[in-house]
Image: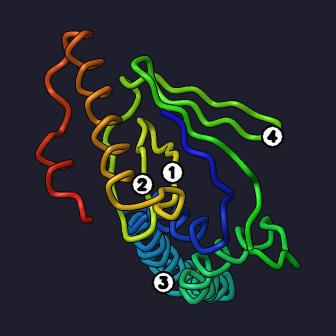
Amino acid sequence: MEISFDLNRDESFEYYERVVFTAAKRRRLYLKAIVLLLFTFAFGGFLILGPPQCPAWGWWFIGLGSAYLINVPRIQSRSLEEVGALLPKNNSKNTFWPQRIVIDEVGLTQIRTLTTLAFKWQAVERIDLSERLVLFLMQQGNALFVPRRAFVDEAALNQFVETARRYRREASQRAGEPNPNQANEATDQR
């Protein structure tokens, strides 16, 4: 089964937020910021209250930790801006990178103008549906996606997703693995 489409900016941003810079990654970033802040405050306090030659260094460390904490919320918006800078501009249709996704019994393949990526079904952790995308979430944080608009209608979308899930289930059974997360896929948003 094969689907052809061009990417657009909104779908690329949704992919980025759902796969690349997820809520879990944002939580880890904030946790690191808090740990760094506590370390710099503790070390700065030690230098201020400790040896008489070091109070200026202590204030410097406290200032460094504070500056980092102030900039943490900007990291996510800067990351999104960097993604936006990579996407082509001045495109009246707001689309770019024509590609095809092919699924068969062996796996799924993404074919672009200059590259081809192929994944066996064993590498696919789950298949999710969002409001705009069908996401193939791979091991180690990789993912491929197909926009819903690439399908003629909801029936074609459902047939594609069910076929992909069947291929994935059959591949895991052939490999002797337990059934993939059927509960997760049964509760996907439609």
Quarter holding residue 130: bottom left
Which residue is labeled 3 in the image? 45
Q: Where is residue 33 in the image (x, y as percent from the top left)?
A: 48, 73
Cα distance between the residues tagged 1 and 4: 17 Å
Measured Cα–Cα span from mark 2 to mark 4: 21 Å
**Contact (CB < 8 A) between labels 2 and 3?**
no
Q: Which of marks 1 and 2 is nearer the N terminus?
A: 2
Q: How crowded is mark 3: few (under 14 residues within 10 Å), some or many (20 or more)?
A: some
Foreground disc of the pair 2, 3:
2
Residue carrying label 2: 134
Residue 180 as seen in the image, left or right of residue 22: left
> In this rendering, is residue 120 above or below 110?
above
What residue is pinned by disc 1? 145
Instruction: Please tell me which of labels 4 and 3 falls first in the chain.
Output: 3
Q: Which of marks 1 and 4 is nearer the N terminus?
A: 4
Q: Which amino acid does label 1 sit on?
A: Phe
Secondary structure at badge 4 equals loop
Q: How far apart are marks 1 and 2 (CA)?
A: 5 Å
Under mark 4, the amino acid is Thr
**Residue 94: % across, % down:** 74, 74
Residue 113 bears which disc, if any? 4
Q: Is the C-beta separation of discs 1 and 2 under 8 Å?
A: yes
Q: Do the residues labelled 2 and 4 touch (CB within 8 Å)?
A: no
The answer to which image quadrant residue 57 occupies is bottom right
Q: Residue furthest right?
A: 90
- Quadrant holding the C terminus: bottom left
Which residue is located at x 19 percent, y 10 percent? 176
Frontmost residue, 117 versus 36: 117
The figure's colour scheme reads rainbow
Three-letter code for the amino acid on which mark 2 is drawn: Val
